């Protein structure tokens, strides 16, 4: 066709290597062969023709959100002889109809984030990771903080629900790890932060959350209720973080951790690796952050609770034991997400693991056998019907021993032996080693020997060193007296 601009059809065909007949054919119709083919008609009759306009289109108009499988099931219900193998045909036809005649869809507007403006908080469930602590499943979730511009993130293990305490502790940990404060803080409609009143309610912040935002100088914002993609900068990051944790657990080869602190260190390490990949953008955003205040603000709740004669106190349907010398006193208890810090006046006296109720009808117990073992030794039979007996045993071996002794029909001996072994574990600080010895005996089909265990875990006798004391002769004191006299006279002479 380029030659044809200046040459005749015969000359252009010759230069292009075509025959003269092809030249005149192209001259008459320049379309390529692929465009000359007539559209292929249907090879069989349209199976949807009897139903499309009469039934399917009315269904789509009346229920725009209905699934294709729902339409197919309705057609099969109306027409028992309807062929179910045309599902793919129905899907293509409905998708094409919706593209031309369906309702307008929501549009997501991509945002451009500036450094230092927006930080986001949210909680995410990580139960699918299957984490265990010393063999026990860990019921928890993660508090997740992220900066929209740089992608800096921080994760904090939360043992309870989405409470203000968890939000305040996690957010402050994130800000102090970051070293600065963004201008805005966004979350979804957390009940810990918002009262979630009517849409026209202006004062919708909880007082504690408003105080937290005021302390750090951040403007509180939230996304519209039910519109999760408005928090896409944190919602999408949840999945990436959980996949990173899953990959690290697979490489680790096990999902059990020795302690909660070990698991928290593991999460911090994974988050730190992810932040290391964004070090340049994080450094750029740090320059735009506001400075931190002089100190943290309150990230706990506080209650004043009396210690009862049961050797503990009840807080939010959970009974906690404390040292019995505190009975009759009132403790000031700081409630964190994972612990309680107890004060007598301003003096810290004990830190306890935070417990949760078993169910809506049944409370919980957090028991340390060390707090009550001295009294239990005087009343060992109290162990039989003790309300928190199962929680008293620090390890499974002690509970197994107690149940085995009871199976032999002597409750008195079961209580006496079990209590004495618990006392031995406390006095000799050998709880783990003693539990292992008990388990070995039980596995071998024999009962532990209390006297032998006492002898095994008794303090090692230390040999008393022989000290030879050589007394100084009495004449040495006479010499010291004469030296002192001469020294006094010489000082007097110098003074004169």
Image (cartoon, helix red, strand yellow):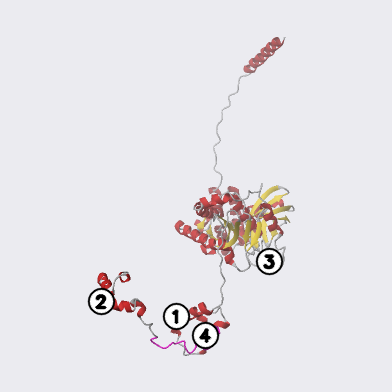
State the residue position of label 4: 56
State the residue position of label 1: 88
Front tag of 2 and 4: 2
On screen, residue 244 versus residue 140, left or right, reads left
Instruction: Give how far apart the Cα atoms at labels 2 and 3 are.
Output: 83 Å
Quick check: is 283 in the magenta stretch?
A: no
Q: In front here: 337 or 379?
A: 337
Residue at image point 44% right, 83% down = 86
On screen, residue 305 versus residue 106, left or right, reads right
The reply to whether callout 2 and callout 4 are in contact (CB within 8 Å) is no
State the residue position of label 3: 196
Say which mark, if any, is on residue 418: none
State the residue position of label 2: 20
Residue at image point 70% right, 59% down = 314
Q: Which is more N-terminal, label 4 or label 3?
A: 4
* Position of residue 293 measured from the top left corner of the image (x, y, whole percent): 66, 48
Start-end of magenta stretch = 42-59
* Position of residue 73 measured from the top left corner of the image (x, y, whole percent): 51, 84
Instruction: Give how far apart the Cα atoms at labels 2 and 4 are.
Output: 56 Å
* Position of residue 70 measured from the top left corner of the image (x, y, whole percent): 52, 81
Quick check: is 44 in the magenta stretch?
A: yes
Q: Which is more N-terminal, label 1 or label 3?
A: 1
């Amino acid at each position: 066709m380029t030659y044809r601009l200046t040459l005749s059809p015969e000359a252009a065909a010759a230069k292009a290597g075509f025959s003269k007949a092809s030249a005149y054919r192209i001259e008459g119709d320049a379309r390529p062969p692929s465009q000359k083919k007539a559209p292929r008609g249907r090879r069989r009759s349209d199976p949807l023709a009897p139903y499309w306009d009469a039934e399917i289109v009315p269904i789509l108009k009346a229920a725009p959100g209905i699934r294709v499988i729902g339409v197919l099931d309705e057609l099969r219900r109306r027409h028992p002889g309807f062929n179910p193998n045309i599902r793919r045909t129905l899907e293509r036809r409905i998708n094409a109809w919706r593209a031309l005649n369906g309702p307008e869809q929501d549009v997501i507007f991509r945002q451009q984030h500036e450094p230092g403006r927006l930080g986001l908080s949210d909680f995410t469930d990580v139960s699918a990771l299957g984490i265990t602590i010393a063999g026990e499943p860990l019921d928890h979730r993660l508090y997740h903080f992220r900066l929209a511009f740089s992608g800096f993130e921080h994760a904090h293990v939360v043992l309870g629900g989405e409470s203000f305490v968890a939000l305040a502790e996690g957010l402050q940990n994130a800000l102090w790890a970051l070293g600065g404060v963004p201008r805005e803080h966004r979350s979804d409609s957390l009940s810990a932060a918002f009262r979630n009143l009517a849409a026209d309610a202006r004062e919708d912040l909880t007082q504690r959350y408003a105080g937290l935002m005021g302390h750090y100088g951040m403007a509180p914002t939230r996304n519209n209720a039910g519109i999760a993609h408005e928090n896409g900068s944190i919602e999408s990051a949840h999945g990436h973080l959980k996949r990173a944790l899953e990959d690290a657990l697979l490489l680790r080869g096990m999902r059990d951790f020795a302690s909660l602190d070990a698991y928290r260190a593991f999460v911090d390490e994974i988050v730190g690796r992810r932040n290391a990949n964004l070090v340049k953008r994080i450094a750029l955003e740090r320059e735009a952050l506001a400075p931190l205040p002089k100190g943290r603000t309150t990230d706990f709740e506080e209650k004043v609770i009396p210690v009862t004669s049961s050797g503990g106190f009840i807080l939010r349907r959970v009974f906690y034991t404390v040292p019995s010398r505190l009975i009759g006193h009132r403790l000031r208890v700081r409630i964190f997400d994972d612990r309680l810090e107890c004060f007598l006046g301003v003096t810290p006296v004990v830190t306890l693991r935070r417990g949760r109720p078993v169910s809506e009808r049944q409370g919980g117990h957090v028991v340390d056998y060390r707090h009550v073992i001295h009294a239990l030794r005087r009343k060992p039979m109290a162990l039989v019907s003790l309300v928190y007996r199962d929680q008293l045993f620090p390890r499974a071996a002690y509970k197994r021993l107690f149940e085995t002794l009871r199976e032999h029909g002597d409750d008195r001996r079961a209580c006496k032996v079990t209590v004495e072994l618990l006392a031995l574990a406390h006095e000799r600080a050998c709880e783990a080693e003693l539990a292992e010895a008990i388990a070995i005996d039980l596995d071998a089909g024999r009962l532990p020997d209390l006297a032998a265990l006492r002898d095994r875990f008794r303090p090692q006798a230390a040999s008393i060193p022989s000290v030879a004391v050589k007394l100084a002769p009495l004449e040495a004191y006479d010499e010291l007296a004469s030296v002192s006299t001469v020294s006094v006279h010489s000082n007097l002479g110098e003074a004169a």
